[in-house]
Image (tube, rainbow, N blue to C red):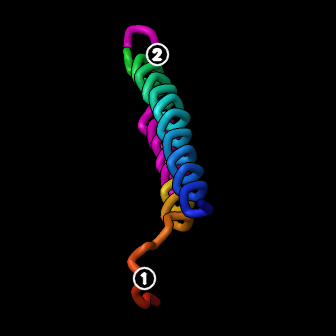
Amino acid sequence: MNIHRYMDNSQAKQERFKRVASRRVENILQGIRSLSKCSNPNNYDYEEEDLNKMFKAIKEELKIMETLYKKNLKNDSGSFNF
């Protein structure tokens, strides 16, 4: 019976992740689309240095997020790893 509870809990956590993460990814994508609108030279003036700072900040945050996810990823292979 305990194994069924574990599987139910695991499935619930996975479903919750998919629901919450999907919403958050969509919000991020909408934010990126909104930021892209700032590329219109008729409305905005920017220099390459501005773009470099902006892209650097975004890339750094993505790298942090990727590192966190990979660090917390469960390795179910059961084999020895360094």
Q: Give the amino acid type for the residue marked by disc 1 in the picture.
A: Gly
Q: Which residue position is annotated with label 2?
A: 44
In the figure, 51 relative to 59: above or below? above
Q: Which residue position is annotated with label 1?
A: 78
Q: Position of residue 71 (x, y in %)?
A: 54, 67
Q: Position of residue 67 (x, y in %)?
A: 52, 62
Q: Position of residue 76 (x, y in %)?
A: 43, 73
Q: Is residue 64 magenta?
A: no
Rendered-image quadrant of the N terminus: bottom right
| Labels 1 and 2: the sequence-earlier one | 2
Task: Please name whichever residue, 50 or 38, is drawn nearer the observer in this view of the structure.
Answer: 38
Q: Between label 1 and label 2, give the one nearer the viewer.
A: 1
Residue 36's disc number: none
Q: Tell me if mark 2 has few (under 14), some (14-19) or many (20+) residues whose alpha carbon lies within 10 angstroms of its own.
A: few
Q: Position of residue 82 (x, y in %)?
A: 46, 90
Residue at position x 51%, y 38% in the image: 21
Instruction: Read off the magenta span.
Output: 41-63
Image-quadrant location for residue 32: top left
